[in-house]
Each structure stands twice: as C-alpha cells, then as structure tokens.
Amino acid sequence: MRISELSRRSGVSIPTIKYYLRDGLLPAGRPTAANQAEYDEDHVRRLRLIRSLIGVRGLSVSATRDVLAAVDEQQGDMHLLLGLVLGALPVERSGRPPRRDDAAEPAGAGAAAGDAAGDVAALTAEMGWKTSPNPPAAQVVAETLETMRALGVDYDWRSLVPYAELADRAARLDLDQLRDAGDPLQQAERAVLLTVLLEPALLALRRLAQEHHSALRFGNG
C-alpha cells in the first residue's frame, strides 16, 4: 500500500508516519521509486502499537523506541512481550529487558521495606502468583500498605486476599480477550488498550457498585 493508505488504515497522519520513519520507530517500506515506497500489514500493526504506547500508555518517543526494540527481540516470547509493553518489566537503553539476576531494586524500596514488603511477598505466595523480581506493581502495593499503617489503619496482606482474588479473575478475562489477535503485535496493542483504557472504567464500576450496595444497606428507600 502507499503511505496515504497506510495513514488511513492506521489512523496516523502522514507527517507523523514520516517522523516515525526518520526516527527509527517504523521500518522503511519497500522502495518503488526515488521518493516512493510501499508498505504492508506489518507496518499497519506496528503503527497501531506505536499509537497505543504513545497515545494510551503516555510513553515518550524515546521510551517507545526502546520498548519497540525489545519487542522486536522478544516476539517469540509472548509473556515477556506483554511485560514490556505494559510496563511490568523495565527496558534497558540497549532495548533489552534486564536479566533476572540483574534486576535492580526499585527506587524508594527502602521506604516500603519491612512489614509492607513482606506482606506483598506473603500475598503473592498465597495467591500462587509468579512474578518478575521487584515488579513496579508490587512496589505500589507495599507503599500503599505503608501509608495506611502510618495513618493508623490496621491493614495487612490477609485483608487484600479477597481483592487479589477479584484481580486474578479480571486478569484471566484480560488475557482471554487476546486470543482472537493471532499476531504478537496485535496482541501487544490490545493488551495495552485493555489494561490502560479499562482501568478508569473498572474503578468507576466499583464506585457504582458501592453506591448500589450502600443504598441497599443504609438507604431510606
């Protein structure tokens, strides 16, 4: 297809496509003339993933380039590919995810160490979850527990088990929706959309459910 068709199919403007080509985010098309080239379905899928990483996940062009470089190397490993595009795994400037034994302790880990970090480890063990070393999400949970304790709220990992069970079911639903996308780049794009775009809606659904059950328990009819 010509670049105009590529723009129409991907939803990305022609000037932006040319910028991605110059900056190395998008591979060059097959030359057909001095200033013309043809593009294929791989370019469409690549552009949609770029749009998801920049427009939905909010990554910079530089960070997107690093993620795409890692994706190119890891297309045979769907688990690792999803970890890269969703931000569960950090990406080195070389474009490779760090080895497990090289994983650095996340910033601020000392502040959330001790009881809260131990709670997160106990929770993931209770759930039987297999995760990478020091995942950013675990750090968020640990810091949240630390804050709650600092405010005098008695909350530990056992209190989170029912929520973890709900999260486990939600994660299964998320991954079930990737089955129809056979191409790894399509799966990666859909994973970003399902994770980032759905999160505000999931929080809003929780609020709606809270309002409903509050009305049932405490309302005056």
Image (spheres, rainbow, N blue to C red):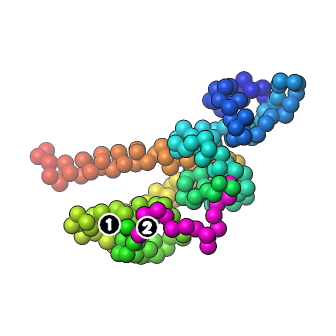
Q: Nearer the viewer, residue 107 or 88?
A: 107
**Position of residue 69 in the picture relative to residue 177 (left or right):** right
Residue found 49% across the figure and 64% down from its top: 106
Q: Main secondary structure of the magenta part?
A: loop
Q: CA distance from mark 2 to mark 1?
A: 11 Å
How many marks the image carries: the answer is 2
Amino acid at the residue labelled 2? Ala
Residue 136, magenta (yes or no): no
Return the x and y of residue 86 as percentages of the image width and height: 55, 53
Q: Are marks 2 and 1 in contact (CB under 8 Å)?
A: no
Give the quadrant of residue 114: bottom left
Residue found 44% across the figure and 74% down from its top: 121
Residue bearing mark 2: 109
Q: Quadrant of the C terminus?
A: top left
Farthest residue, direction right = 33
**Position of residue 202 in the picture relative to residue 152 (left or right):** right
Residue found 30% across the figure and 46% down from its top: 208
Residue bearing mark 1: 146
Q: Nearer the viewer, residue 200 or 215?
A: 200
Residue 55 visible within the image = yes
Amino acid at the residue labelled 1? Glu
- Packing grade of label 1 (10 A; few <14, some 14-19, many >=20) is many
Give the quadrant of residue 59: top right
Please tell me whether residue 159 is drawn above or below residue 1 in the rendered image: below
Return the x and y of residue 120 as percentages of the image width and height: 41, 71
Q: Quadrant of the N terminus?
A: top right
User: Secondary structure under badge 2?
Assistant: loop
Instruction: Report the magenta residues as a range.
Output: 95-110
User: Secondary structure under badge 1?
Assistant: helix
Return the x and y of residue 145 as percentages of the image width and height: 33, 66
